[in-house]
């Protein structure tokens, strides 16, 4: 067992505990297979979790999205689950504080550990006199490790990006100057690709390139394998020096007495520690983080157009699936392949923006369930089916969820569907004062569920990148958000849900753009423009549970869906679309 081999290595090196987070050197959401050390060690395939190994203990911490999945996957790997966020369950840091003995040693790989997390751990254990050591104990154990990603980089044309790389660098340097800093170190791939208007294929579902970027006052240095950079070195030659990826950490040690701006929450400990020795560090959020979150007019126009085309693909899929199950059951995975085909009809579609969740019945209670050819349930002509999917297009990134009645549904399912819809409509209809923070909108959304003592163990909404990451921060409508003011031009999801283990899962998700709603004596107000265009299942709604305003918002949304999509449809599917977007009345 891998766990036994790791413990042997720990004993040889006098290590008492070893921590393995879900991370790569760039803190990507979707790790390349090469960096999936925690999955290799624990067997857990989810996207979030941290493993802790001691002489007699082996724990995996993960959140509510993955409790069911993790419990099943780790059982043969020697790990026990810590249900992070559950009452009475300690965080990893608190567990270590309560259990570690004086002068014991903790090891971790600094490449895969954020500086902010490292400092929190160091602070937590300060009075325990514990020694934290930067050490790689997994590399030597992983004999059949996957290959390092080697996709080709390419340029994203300005007609899609909406702003030149020169302009973006100029804006960043201006802010750097205002902060009195000499340079900015960036290890986040979405920031780097956004700044330079480049894209790649190193990260699953996300058009990113494994790279590092240093922005100085008079030059920028991009670190990437040179064989990847053949198609970008020409366009970048006047603004950027390209160096080998492996030279980055070596070059960091050359900086002396510089004032360096860096984001501790997005840079790994190894990077930070090499710079800290000889320079003055200024910590703050990546400058590009906020610039990227507010989309420009070309990005917004392209994104709106993309949701028409993407909505058509999903609408066709729902129509097809509802008719297909009348002829007999179909597997969840087999069905989602048909959705891929509908999206692929669009010439600007590249690939999916995340792993499609095609989940029937009780499988949908697992928020991040994934069907496969070998492991799929049959979708039958009854109950709920949930599909959460999205696409990467040159004109934007999409994400949408629909819960579909495949036939007769129970009274309980109807009630929960309607409660979810009420939450969704309340956020869709929100009007809020300029300066309102993202987390403040979370309570507004959950209230309808809380009245019935229900909740969902995830955030309500996340930012969406432009032909970048489908999950972008900021904004983040969640009780866990640090609180960021909503700004005009931000794009965010609206996805409340009800998840009942062993029964079903319900989620309704649309993507929304923050727009102005006018200036008044009490200030400027904002509201949402709904980008997503796809019918919401009206046969599962208990109309008497909706307020007059909620019914008005739903009818208005469906009127817009029909107007925008009907011009591209004909025949039976057009008749169906008219029926499922009809005006509901009491």
Image (cartoon, rainbow, N blue to C red):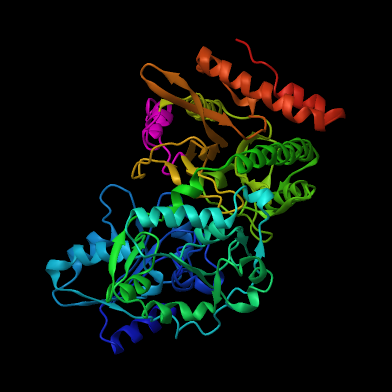
Please indicate whether residue 252 sits to the left or right of residue 340 in the image: left
In front of the other: 582 or 406: 582
Q: Is residue 420 above or below residue 85?
A: above
Residue extending furthest bottom?
12
Res. 326 image quadrant: top right
Q: Is residue 380 magenta?
A: no
Furthest-right residue in this view: 571
Question: What is the x, y in percent for residue 172?
Answer: 45, 55
x and y, in percent, of residue 115 in the image: 33, 65
Q: Is residue 186 visible?
A: no
Which contiguous range is marked in magenta? 434-460
Can residue 437 be found in the magenta stretch?
yes
The outermost residue toward the top is: 586
Q: Quadrant of residue 187?
A: bottom left
At 69% from the left and 27% from the top, the residue drawn is: 561
Residue at (62% x, 24% y) in the render: 557
Number of numbered tags placed on the structure image = 0
Classify residue 268 as left or right of residue 156.
Answer: left
Q: Position of residue 577 (x, y in %)?
A: 75, 27
Q: Return the x and y of residue 194 as percentages of the image width and height.
A: 55, 56
Which quarter of the figure is the C terminus placed in? Answer: top right
């Amino acid at each position: 067992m891998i766990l036994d081999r790791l413990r042997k290595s720990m004993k040889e090196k006098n290590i008492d505990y070893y921590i393995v987070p879900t991370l790569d050197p760039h803190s990507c959401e979707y790790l390349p297979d090469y960096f999936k050390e925690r999955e290799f060690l624990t067997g857990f395939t989810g996207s979030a979790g941290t493993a802790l190994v001691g002489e007699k203990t082996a724990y995996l911490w993960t959140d509510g999205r993955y409790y069911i999945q993790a419990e099943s996957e780790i059982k043969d790997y020697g790990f026990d689950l810590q249900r992070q966020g559950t009452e009475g369950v300690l965080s990893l840091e608190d567990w270590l504080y309560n259990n570690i003995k004086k002068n014991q040693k903790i090891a971790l790989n600094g490449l895969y550990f954020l500086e902010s997390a490292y400092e929190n751990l160091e602070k937590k254990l300060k009075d325990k006199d514990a020694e934290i050591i930067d050490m790689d104990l997994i590399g030597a154990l992983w004999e059949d490790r996957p290959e390092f990603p080697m996709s080709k980089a390419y340029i994203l044309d300005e007609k899609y990006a909406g702003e030149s790389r020169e302009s973006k660098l100029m804006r960043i340097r201006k802010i750097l100057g205002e902060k009195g800093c000499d340079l900015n170190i960036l290890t986040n791939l979405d920031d780097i690709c956004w700044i330079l208007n480049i894209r790649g294929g190193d990260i699953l579902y996300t058009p990113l390139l494994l790279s590092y970027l240093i922005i100085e006052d008079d030059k920028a240095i991009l670190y990437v394998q040179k064989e990847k950079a053949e198609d970008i070195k020409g366009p970048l030659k006047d603004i950027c020096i390209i160096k080998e990826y492996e030279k980055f950490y070596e070059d960091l040690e050359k900086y002396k007495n510089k004032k360096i701006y860096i984001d501790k929450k997005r840079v790994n400990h190894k990077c930070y520690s090499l710079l800290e020795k000889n320079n003055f560090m200024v910590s703050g959020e990546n400058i590009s983080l906020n610039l990227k979150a507010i989309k420009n007019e070309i990005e917004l126009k392209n994104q709106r157009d993309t949701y028409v085309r993407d909505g058509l693909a999903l609408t066709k899929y729902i129509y097809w699936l509802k008719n297909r199950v009348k002829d007999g059951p179909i597997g969840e995975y087999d069905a989602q392949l048909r959705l891929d085909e509908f999206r692929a009809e669009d010439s600007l579609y590249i690939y999916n923006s995340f792993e499609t969740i095609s989940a029937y019945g009780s499988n949908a209670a697992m928020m991040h369930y994934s069907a496969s050819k070998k492991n799929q349930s049959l979708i039958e002509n009854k109950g709920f089916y949930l599909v959460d999917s999205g696409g990467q297009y040159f004109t934007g990134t999409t994400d949408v969820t629909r819960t579909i009645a495949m036939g007769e549904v129970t009274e309980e399912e109807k009630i929960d569907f309607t409660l979810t819809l009420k939450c969704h409509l309340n956020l869709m209809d929100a009007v809020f004062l300029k300066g309102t923070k993202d987390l403040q909108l979370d309570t507004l959304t959950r209230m309808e569920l809380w009245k019935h003592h229900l909740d969902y163990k995830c955030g309500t909404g996340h930012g969406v990148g432009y032909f970048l990451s489908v999950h972008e921060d900021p904004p983040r409508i969640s009780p866990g958000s640090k609180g960021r003011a909503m700004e005009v031009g931000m794009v965010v999801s609206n996805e409340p849900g009800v998840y009942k283990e062993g029964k079903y899962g319900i989620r309704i998700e649309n993507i929304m753009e923050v727009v102005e709603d006018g200036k008044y004596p009490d200030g400027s107000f904002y509201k949402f423009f709904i980008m997503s265009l796809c019918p919401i299942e009206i046969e599962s709604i208990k109309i008497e549970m909706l307020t007059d305003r909620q019914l008005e918002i739903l009818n208005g949304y469906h009127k817009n869906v029909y107007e925008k999509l009907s011009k591209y449809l004909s025949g039976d599917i057009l008749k169906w679309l008219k029926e499922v977007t009809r005006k509901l009345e009491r």
